[in-house]
Structure formats: structure tokens, C-alpha cells
Image (cartoon, rainbow, N blue to C red):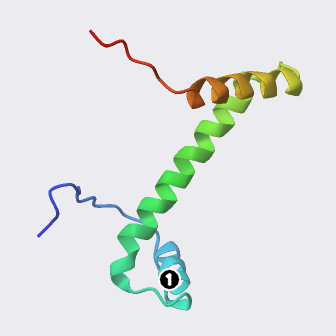
Amino acid sequence: MLNPTTTRWTVAVSRETDIAVRSFLAQRGMKKGDLPKFIEDAVRWRMLDQTMAETRGKFADLPSGEVGAMIDEAVAAERQPAFFARG
């Protein structure tokens, strides 16, 4: 039975990819049941990679020092404690 927080996917991959992934997992001591976790991790990393590439493209025309300053400013703003008015 599936956990209510999971969704079942049906995907098709080439036989070559299936063998490569299962061999990869087996070489690292992982079992067949580890395949869903491996796929989920791979999807998350791919989404992060694509998002980072898109973001880099949007800032490609700015000098790196300016981008660094923008990042530093955003990080500093997030690290400041939030003060909520009590009323």
C-alpha cells in the first residue's frame, strides 16, 4: 500500500538505462527497493540544475561582482530576525 504522501509513477526507460541504473545501485549495495529514492533524488538534482542554469542565463549580462553583491544583500535580509508587532 502506498503512503498517502506518495504518488505512483509509471515510466518507461530503455533496457540499457534500466540495466545501467540497477547495476549502479547494486555496486553500491543498494537494493531494488532503493530505486524510487534514487529516482526522486535524481529528479530533484536535475530540477535544481535546470533552475540554476536558467538563473545564470538571466544574470549573464551583469558583472559577477554585482551579482555577488545582490546575493549577499538577499542573504543578509533573510538572516535578519523578524520582528512582529504585538497588538
Q: Residue at x 15, y 65 (%)?
A: 2
Residue furthest left as drawn: 1
Looking at the rendering, in which quadrant would you find the N terminus?
Answer: bottom left
Q: Residue at x 38, y 77 (%)?
A: 34
Measuring from the top left, give residue 47's x and y in whole percent.
53, 45
- The residue under label 1 is 25
Measuring from the top left, give residue 36's x and y in whole percent.
36, 69
On the picture, is 83 further left or further right than 36? Answer: right
On the picture, is 20 further left or further right than 52? Answer: left
On the picture, is 26 further left or further right than 85? Answer: right
Kind of residue sitting beneath label 1: Leu
Measuring from the top left, give residue 74's x and y in whole percent.
65, 24
Looking at the picture, does residue 57 appear above or below residue 46?
above
Measuring from the top left, give residue 69's x and y in whole percent.
79, 23
Q: Residue at x 83, y 19 (%)?
A: 62
Secondary structure found at label 1? helix
Q: Nearer the viewer, residue 84 or 33?
A: 84
Looking at the picture, does residue 62 appear above or below residue 15?
above
Looking at the picture, does residue 44 appear above or below residue 67?
below
> In the figure, residue 27 lies in which quadrant?
bottom right
Looking at the rendering, in which quadrant would you find the C terminus?
Answer: top left
